[in-house]
Amino acid sequence: TDALRQQSADIFTQDDGMDVSLCCIDEKDKSILKYAAANHTIFIKNKNGLTQLTGDIYSIGGSIGNNKKHFTTGEYKIEKESFIILSSDGYADQFGGAEDSKFLVKHFKDIIQKTDFTGGNAEEVFKKTFEEWKGENGHVQDIIIKYLKDLNQDFYICGPPTMVDDTINELKKLGKEE
């Protein structure tokens, strides 16, 4: 909460939380995904379909729940040929379409289910769908989508560049290589 400037209650204090997902591959068994999600969902797509890994219902920081929040760590067994899809909430929160409504997670799931991640054009599919949806509307917030197949790393970080850089620096301090 220090980074989010939430120590006091003056008019300059930020009271927003941050929605985020964190995934780690087990060092001993690379088929085990350990994850935590703050008001977020992680998607796993494989030959058996689409799985949603849901996290806790609240954000990091913000006034809801104050400092007594407990975040749960989950585990998921990753099958071969699985893709892990992480996204910021900016995609689902974008206004557009015929009724100028939010895109929503439901539509995001539909795109994931229809997208062939093995073909290498997934980023283009997400970008084109987003641009068509938003139409003349501007961006509501930053859009970050990351999908992973090569699970040879211990950590995967998805987020704004400054957050990613800070996280990498903290991992280096803990002795983890890039």
Image (cartoon, rainbow, N blue to C red):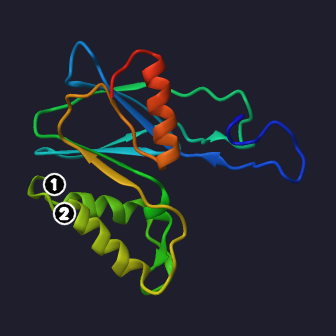
User: Left or right: 13 with respect to 25?
Assistant: right
**Which residue reaches farthest right?**
10
For residue 162, side relative to residue 10 (left or right): left
Residue located 43% across and 34% down the image: 22
- From mark 2 to mark 1, how far is it between C-alphas? 9 Å
Q: Could you say whether the residue bearing mark 2 is in a helix, strand or loop?
A: helix
Q: Quadrant of the C terminus?
A: top left
Does 67 sit above or below residue 84? above
**Where in the figure is residue 172, as x and y percent of width and height?**
43, 22
Residue type, numbered disc 1: Phe
- Vertical comparison of 127 with 87: above or below: below
| Residue annotated with mark 2 | 114
**Camera-nearest residue between 61 and 57:** 61
**Number of residues whose C-alpha sits closer than 10 Å to that of mark 2, classed few (under 14), some (14–19) or many (20 or more):** few
* Mark 1, other Cα within 10 Å: few <14 / some 14–19 / many ≥20: many
Image quadrant occupied by the N terminus: top right
User: What amino acid is labelled 2 in the image?
Assistant: Lys
> Residue at position x 71%, y 36% from top?
65
Residue that mark 1 sits on: 117
In the image, is residue 121 above or below residue 76?
A: below
Q: Number of marks in the image? A: 2
